[in-house]
Amino acid sequence: MRLKSQRKASILFFTVLGICLVALAVALNVGWIILNLREVVLLVLGVIFFLVIIAGLVLNTIFLIREIRLNEQHDSFINAVTHELKTPIASMRLYLETLQTREVDEAKRQEFYRIMLADNDRLLHTVEQVLRASRTQHSQRTVERVALDLGVLARDCVELARTRTHLNVGELRFVNQLTNGEQVWVKGDPDELRAVLSNLIDNAIKYSGKRVDVAVTLAAPSAKQAVLYVSDQGIGLAPNQLKRIFKRFYRVPARVALRVKGTGLGLFIVRSVIEKHDGKVFAESAGEGLGSTFTIQLPRLVMAAENEFNEVKEALG
């Protein structure tokens, strides 16, 4: 709390300093120009010098404020990761100590094992998120790409999330808008794309509140594009958050979302991976409390077998 107050004071100090310097520069340059109206060359140089000083002061103030805010986000991320690591470790230690020091029946023992496995999964997920976020920042990192059936990948992710979160088909479902058994192929890294879908589905579930209604929809609006929609009926997003949520460490500041645990890396990873696959991702929402939809657009890969099938179909009329 004290550190936060100090940073707010620093922002206020640099803002006031910038305003004072701008005012001083204006006063000095205007006075100098008035005294030298007859000197045209000096007048032009004075105007240029004045504009350079103003631009420099404004850029300096913006840079300082941005750095202070980035440090605040970084500290929030460290606190979130520390909590995400410490909580499951403390929980597993408690159950292990209980198993070591007390006699428990088999049913209770199995319940302890299930809870510890869940804590272990949570711990592993946090570590993977941090490592994946670190890897996505390396622009020289190559992505291993293979041909993937996007529909199969999306269905598998939905079924895995449904099993892990104990949801039914009505609460979390996969919708295939393609007809006649059509397949949508893309070229990409299966692990990276699976992580993207898992992050979006997990977010949709977490931010749905008590009533979960999440749909993952596959579509192919053209022969060159594959699209996945992840929609929920949760807390929604304000218009000014639709682009900011993809920034590293950023978390939605809504009161409802404060109870949702996380590191602020999930959507940053989503955007980084999709961009490396030459695709686009964006969010849409009608407003707070009205749910949201995340759209993934990827280049569609036309397989040779599919081409041959279409050629035969056209030849037969």
Image (cartoon, rainbow, N blue to C red):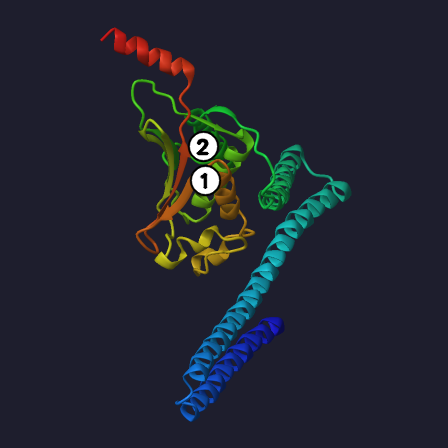
Q: Which mark is residue 158?
A: 2
Image position of 251 with respect to 45: above or below = above
Which quadrant holds residue 122?
Answer: top right
Outermost residue, top direction?
316
State the image coordinates of residue 159 (x, y, percent, origin top left). Answer: 46, 30
Q: Quadrant of the N terminus?
A: bottom right
Residue 293 appearing in the image: yes
**Which residue in the protein does label 1 denote?**
201
Which secondary structure, mark 2? helix
Check the image and name the residue furthest to the bottom: 35
Measured as percent of width and height from the top left, residue 281 is found at 42, 43
**What whole-number distance in Å separates the C-alpha atoms at marks 2 and 1?**
8 Å
Q: Marks 1 and 2: in contact by CB < 8 Å?
A: yes
The structure residue drawn at horizontal position 35% and vertical position 46%, both measured from the top left corner, is 233
Q: Residue at 43% across / 57% down in the picture? A: 256
Which quadrant of the structure image shows residue 204?
top left
Residue 52 image offset from top left, x and y in percent: 49, 74
* Circle 1 Cα neighbour tier, 10 Å, few/some/many (<14 / 14–19 / ≥20): many
Q: Earlier in the sequence, mark 2 or mark 1?
A: 2
Judged from the image, the secondary structure of the residue bearing numbered disc 1 is: helix
Identify the residue at the far left of this view: 317
Nearest the viewer among 85 and 128 is 128
Quadrant of the snapshot with the C terminus: top left
Amino acid type of disc 2? Val
For residue 165, say whether it is visible: no
Eyeballing the image, is 179 above or below 263? Answer: above
